[in-house]
């Protein structure tokens, strides 16, 4: 699996340059990809996959998980509160907690199911009106709510503005994580993964570099 090896090499090189020992978890973002496109990655040993729609993940993954029970599924798209229960049932990590109503819905689903997916709070790091994520100013309050609801937060997640260099936004997310005592950083996509690794990403989310351009 040439593209997988190539991507892992990019990540390893960036980690070496940053003097990092631990490599981030590589999430292969498989949204819009067919099982036929996904299977070669599974055969090459890739186990973490990302989807951005609950329905699509429900359609695609039960059969693939039956073949590879150790797959870990990551929800990387905006989540409606009325899908919280289904998301908690299916996903091992949710990267898009971004508002009080969703935090409450997730807390309820966690309590009811006993499942505890890793939870990341998405931060609208470039203050873009069209993007999901909690405003930087409201992050502390949302984290306090989540903790008050009994949720433990694995990390922060961001998608920097497409038209600007990502590095300063990754640095800001890392600073926010330190300030709020959160350990993980879900950041870095196909075009900016090196920068994210250098800034301390614990999880990178890669689609295009692994699967080719989305149609
Ligand atoms: C699609 C997507 C990715 C992967 O993006 P690529 O540019 O294809 O690597 C990562 N994160 C999120 C939230 C996405 O929606």
Image: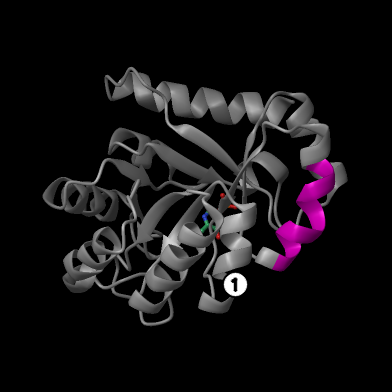
User: Which residue is depicted at the point 55% across and 64% down?
Assistant: 77
Which image quarter holds the N terminus?
Answer: top right
Query: Measured along the vertical axis of the image, is residue 175 above or below residue 141?
Result: above
106 displayed left or right of 4: left
Q: In this orientation, does residue 132 appear? A: no
Residue 17, given in percent of the width and then of the height, sits at: 32, 22
Residue 90, given in percent of the width and then of the height, sits at: 65, 54
Q: Nearer the viewer, residue 189 or 68?
A: 68
Residue 7, given in percent of the width and then of the height, sits at: 57, 31
161 displayed left or right of 5: left
Q: For the residue labelled by badge 1, is the local secondary structure a helix, a strand or a loop? A: helix
Furthest residue toward right = 36
**Residue under label 1:** 83
User: Which residue is depicted at the point 56% across and 41% down?
Assistant: 27
Query: Measured along the vertical axis of the image, is residue 152 above or below residue 9?
Result: below
Magenta region includes residue 58: yes
Q: Nearer the viewer, residue 159 or 6?
A: 159
Query: Picture quarter containing residue 142?
Result: bottom left
């Amino acid at each position: 699996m040439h593209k997988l090896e190539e991507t892992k090499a990019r990540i390893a090189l960036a980690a070496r340059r940053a003097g990092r020992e631990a490599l981030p978890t590589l999430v292969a973002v498989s949204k819009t990809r067919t099982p036929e496109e996904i299977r070669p990655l599974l055969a090459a040993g890739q186990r973490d996959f990302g989807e951005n729609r609950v329905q699509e993940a429900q359609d695609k993954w039960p059969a693939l998980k039956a073949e590879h029970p150790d797959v870990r599924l990551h929800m990387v798209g905006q989540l409606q509160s009325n899908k919280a229960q289904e998301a908690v049932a299916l996903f091992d990590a949710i990267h898009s907690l971004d508002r009080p109503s969703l935090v409450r819905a997730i807390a309820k689903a966690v309590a009811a199911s006993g499942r505890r997916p890793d939870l990341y709070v998405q931060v609208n790091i470039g203050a873009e009106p069209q993007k999901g994520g909690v405003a930087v100013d409201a992050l502390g309050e949302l984290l306090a709510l989540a903790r008050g609801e009994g949720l433990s937060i694995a990390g922060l997640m961001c998608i920097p503005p497409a038209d600007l260099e990502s590095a300063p936004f990754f640095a800001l997310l890392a600073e926010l994580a330190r300030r709020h005592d959160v350990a993980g950083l879900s950041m870095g996509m196909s075009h900016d993964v090196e920068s994210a690794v250098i800034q301390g990403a614990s999880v990178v989310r890669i689609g295009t570099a692994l699967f080719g351009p989305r149609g």
